[in-house]
Amino acid sequence: MTQSIEWLGDRLRFIDQSLLPLEERYNETDDCNVVAEAIRSLKIRGAPLIGIAAAYALALAAAGRAEKDPRAFHAFLLKTAEFLASTRPTAVNLQWALQRLLGRISPETPADEAKRILAEEAIAIHREDSAMCRRIGENGAALLENNSTVITHCNTGALATGGEGTALAVITTAHRTGKSIKVYADETRPLFQGSRLTAWELMKAGIDVTVITDSTAAALMKNERITCVITGADRIASNGDAANKIGTYALAVAARYHEIPMYIAAPSSTIDASIKDGNGIPIEERSPEEVTSIHGYRTAPTGARVYAPAFDVTPAQLITAIVTEKGIYRGPYAFTEEKVRERVELR
Amino acid sequence: MTQSIEWLGDRLRFIDQSLLPLEERYNETDDCNVVAEAIRSLKIRGAPLIGIAAAYALALAAAGRAEKDPRAFHAFLLKTAEFLASTRPTAVNLQWALQRLLGRISPETPADEAKRILAEEAIAIHREDSAMCRRIGENGAALLENNSTVITHCNTGALATGGEGTALAVITTAHRTGKSIKVYADETRPLFQGSRLTAWELMKAGIDVTVITDSTAAALMKNERITCVITGADRIASNGDAANKIGTYALAVAARYHEIPMYIAAPSSTIDASIKDGNGIPIEERSPEEVTSIHGYRTAPTGARVYAPAFDVTPAQLITAIVTEKGIYRGPYAFTEEKVRERVELR
């Protein structure tokens, strides 16, 4: 399994996903700003991995700070966390991980103790994520029968998480238990996470994967026996509405039209029970350049207007089941703060 | 309006669409093989334009042939037409145009007379196509009210035809008659005909156009007031099933789910009444490289399996109306050989 991120005690090692599949390059840094830039520029991506990376980044910022006064040190950490949170506004894991670190310290915590606590907590988040991935894979694999043909979108594997992945862990776990699984990977415009990353991971894992353009998926559902669609999620509202990579909603609509189950697999930290429904989920709009320029090659006229939302929201009624590390949920969904808080017990 | 193809008496001038929108370069040739290569490599593309170009190519091949014996000359033309027909197997206009030229001559026709006849017939096809576009635009414009917001796919404009286009002519005609039309252009993977060509044409025409990735369309239908979807077609079966650029079916499914009308605009030469339904339409599969390599930049691992159909088939029941130069048809469709043959009367 690919190790997408690794804590080396005083610095962070991570694979630069923006270079895949052409080059497998790892970066090492002890600089919080380098990690923030990596998150913003999608060198580090995938909702769970972003949370882990941001947690390590806050620990790095703390470790590198000479300040001794606890209150000033704490104020610095709050400001740094705010800065880190701004790198990807839609990803709730980012906010969640940072809040969890900050919850372990106070303005009275001595600086050296805070440094140790933040590093420990970041490591704990990473370990838990890896355990969560394993459980998501085990829970979700029950949904896949032998000889399944699955369509997936974006990347939700080891590259997106601190473990084996979410939606992709469902597939790799089913494969490992001897089931024959064929995967169609949406290339996932504009950034090709599906063709660049998912195809790369699945080929490495020896799983039968075929790349398609995003708009081929509906035609496949008509012409082939597709067993189900599985994707991850970046944020899930309490009613089960799920924000995920742009194109997920199109898949969900096509799956419903063809009476194919649509599954979402995500850690429970993705659930934001404070949000009633999808309307409350902020949708990050990315730069038009991501659509109109591919590695320097322009695909649209200069000055062309572009609408480039990074995510869309799939309403709960189109989601057959939501798989988390705790189990399989089916609609009508009603995620409460209590349910989400339960995850602390998993530590 | 862009002149995508022009007959110069002894040679053909055409815009190299594979270079747009970066460069507006025109090629001139008297070589049938150059035109065939241009069709195969999508320098010349768009179902109607392919037919016109193939007709001119056959006329060029005839003009350049020194052979005097009528039978040998005729045999050469049959062979050349077969070669030209093989460049894009799905496009029925290609076959239709070549058959029409061949139908004007016989093994007894003197070579010099055949040369003249073929050139005249190619010019006639071009003129008729231009007239057809005008009528398609006029017929279809009635479907668009003022302040419409339209999603379109691929390119169906002046670059795709010998005139103003098909689906795009509907939009440009409505715009010209004073209606305010906002267009979302699917970029249209894998070859970006939407972002490269449609956006370029509409911007030139002063029409409000916004580029989106293909999988954004469904989300737009949920979040914005989309009036309708309009696309072209490459082949229409007698029951109304329509083959068009891959992704059209996904749009049709999403449009149905959101109760948005789905229109197809195409010349009646696109209708192949000899085919009962969509199952009889051959679907060209293009090279995997078109998906995995963009201007030399690889978007998938080396050796990745790819499924890259060039077209999909939208069943008639998802098509609200089919617009041709003869009028607006609504389902249930029943196109007969007689109906299609009527087009000859338009000459």
Image (cartoon, coloured by chain):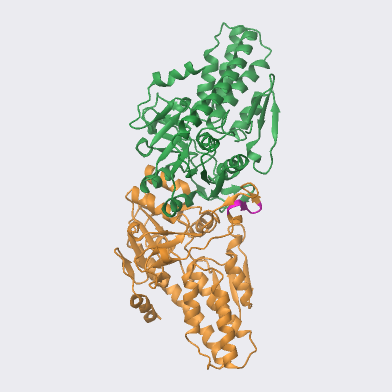
Chain colours: A orange, B green
Coordinates of residue A315 in the picture (x, y in percent) = 37, 59
Q: Residue B31 falls in which quadrant of the image?
A: top right
The residue closer to the viewer here, B148 or A64, is B148
Residue at 62% across / 70% down in the picture? Answer: A37
Q: Which residues are the magenta region?
A: A291-296
The residue closer to the viewer here, A153 or B72, is A153
Q: Which residue extends farthest front? A: B178
Q: Residue A12 falls in which quadrant of the image?
A: bottom right
The residue closer to the viewer here, B218 or A152, is B218
Asked if residue A261 lies left or right of residue B171, the reply is left
Instruction: Reply above or below: B215 against A166.
Output: above
Quarter occupied by the C terminus of chain A: bottom left
Q: Is residue B234 visible?
A: yes
Q: Is residue B24 magenta?
A: no
Residue at 67% across / 15% down in the picture? Answer: B65
Residue at 59% across / 48% down in the picture? Answer: B293
Coordinates of residue A138 in the picture (x, y in percent) = 36, 67
Q: Residue B14 falls in which quadrant of the image?
A: top right
Instruction: Reply above or below: A110 against A236.
Output: below
Instruction: Reply above or below: B116 against A92.
Output: above
Coordinates of residue B122 in the picture (x, y in percent) = 59, 19
Residue at 44% across / 25% down in the picture? Answer: B326
The residue closer to the viewer here, B211 or B86, is B211
Q: Give the total of numbered labels.
A: 0
Coordinates of residue A129 in the picture (x, y in percent) = 45, 74
Asked if residue A205 lies left or right of residue A147, the reply is right
Asked if residue A339 lies left or right of residue B15, the reply is left
Q: Is residue A183 visible?
A: no
